Image (cartoon, grey):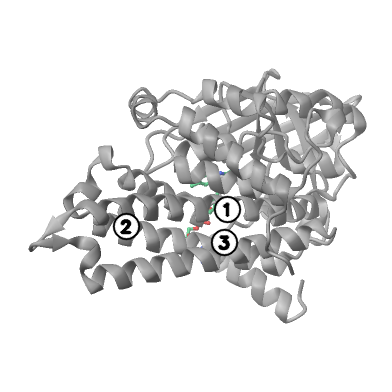
Amino acid sequence: MNFELNKEQKQIKKAVKDFVKGEFKKDIIHELIENKAYPAKILNKASELGFLGIHFPEQYGGEALSVFEKILIAEELAIGSSTVGACVSLAGYGTEILLQYGSEKQKKIWLPKVADAEILSSCAFTEPGIGNNIELSQTTAVKDGNSWLINGRKAFAVNGGPLAGFYIVLCKTDSEAGNPEQGLSTMLVEADCQGVSAVDIGNRLGHKLLFISNIEFNNVRIPLENLIGQEHKGYSQVMEFFNHSRLVIAALSVGTAQGAFDRAFAHVKQREQFGQKLIDFQITRHKLAEMITEIENARLMTWQGALACEKGSTNTKLCSMAKLVATRTAMKVCDHALQLLGGYGYVQEYEVEGFYRDAKMSEILEGNQHVQKDVIADTITGKR
Ligand SMILES: Cc1cc2nc3c(=O)[nH]c(=O)nc-3n(C[C@H](O)[C@H](O)[C@H](O)COP(=O)(O)OP(=O)(O)OC[C@H]3O[C@@H](n4cnc5c(N)ncnc54)[C@H](O)[C@@H]3O)c2cc1C
């Protein structure tokens, strides 16, 4: 497996780095956080540079590149700012489901809007009572004449709220299915449909710029053609989506860890204590060595997962391993980075506190550590 980036990938990385340098100004980001304002201008500029739909085919407004380029972009963005990086990298959250299973009409209507930053896309999978066990979804979609009638409550939908264009909603379509996984379907629900309401989850630990909402579907009527892919195949579609998406979450975590590391490294090179620079203490040098080794390890696992996906066959085990390792690394490295800054680590101006708070989301979203371990164990024991 070759981990050497090709010329185009190096150019993409550089373009994102330049974009981050020009647009991710610390003061502007802190002001956005203060005002709880979505970074819409930055998203528009990312769209102009083609970062949003990089892996969409050209006919849907994309650049026809792959998940590997997508994760390279996610990592670089998160190095600049874990919170703005997540807003940009997750702007098209769930679109892989449309790409892979959607009808031509669904793809033609919705994917260009996401690539052009006209709308955000959102996934409504989990519910207040089911947590990670989305196979137990209680939200129902019932055929009624020429429509589906949708009722239920979903929780924690990233991008849910004012800028959402549509929700991909996991619904129970066969309550008689012996195995609940086989009675679920995904539906494309336009965000402005009558009966859809989104309520922000409220103040949270990190990722304060992301819209995250609880969504209610109250007698929402959508056309039959808004079913995504085959009826009753929704659960496997979502599981397949998680393979790709866990790599993006892993890449955001690698970037979060690297961003915190870079700031701590810069700090210890200039800060003097006890008559010498912090960088000259062996304990600091060893701490930095450990941190950077773990980051590189997480990056390689993430790249390995993405390269495996590129070859056409997603590798569930590698995707879960990458998420497990990268999210754990981000938590650990951010903790060490904050400690290296001492009291300054606790202050917003020095940025590490933001990385530290943001790191936690990735451990929870799309399955926590226990879930990833279950997935990995299932793959090695042949259950999956
Ligand atoms: C910031 C954020 C963004 C999110 N975005 C989305 C989104 O866009 N779309 C979406 O559908 N969902 C989203 N989620 C939901 C997320 O996937 C769920 O929070 C997650 O699935 C856990 O569900 P829960 O919060 O109900 O926790 P619970 O299921 O109540 O679990 C709580 C804890 O119990 C333990 N636990 C639970 N189940 C097990 C198990 N099987 N084995 C061992 N221990 C277990 C774990 O320690 C777990 O952390 C998001 C969540 C957050 C915090």
Q: Would residue 154 be visible to someone looking at this image?
A: no
Q: Is residue 107 above or below residue 325?
A: above
Query: Residue at the location (77% across, 58% down)?
Result: 309
Left or right, 159 with respect to 193, comes to left
Q: Which is more N-terminal, label 1 or label 3?
A: 1
Crowding around mark 2 (Cα neighbors within 10 Å: few <14, some 14 to 19, many 20+) is: many
Which secondary structure lies at badge 1? helix
- Between 151 and 20, which is closer to the camera in this rendering? 20
Say which residue appears at 65% left-offset and 48% top-offset. 10
Residue under label 2: 337
Vertical placement of residue 336 versus 270, above or below:
below
- Compared across the picture, whether 107 is left or right of 220 comes to right
Image quarter in which the C terminus is found: bottom right
Q: Secondary structure at mark 2?
A: helix
In the drawing, does residue 273 fall left or right of residue 129?
left
CA gap, disc 2 and disc 1:
19 Å
Q: Quadrant of residue 336?
A: bottom left
Residue 32, given in percent of the width and then of the height, sits at: 39, 25
Q: CA distance from mark 3 to mark 1?
A: 7 Å
Q: Earlier in the sequence, mark 3 or mark 2?
A: 3
Disc number for residue 299: 3
Up/down of 248 relative to 142, above or below = below
* Disc 1: which residue: 251
Q: In this picture, is 368 found above or below 359?
A: below
Amino acid type shown at disc 2? Ala
The answer to whether residue 63 is left or right of residue 122 is right
Q: Residues within 10 Å of mark 1 (few under 14, many from 20)?
A: many
Instruction: Give, as a three-letter code, the residue at label 3.
Output: Arg
Residue 127 position, x and y percent, is 59, 45
* Residue at left offset 90%, top offset 27%: 105
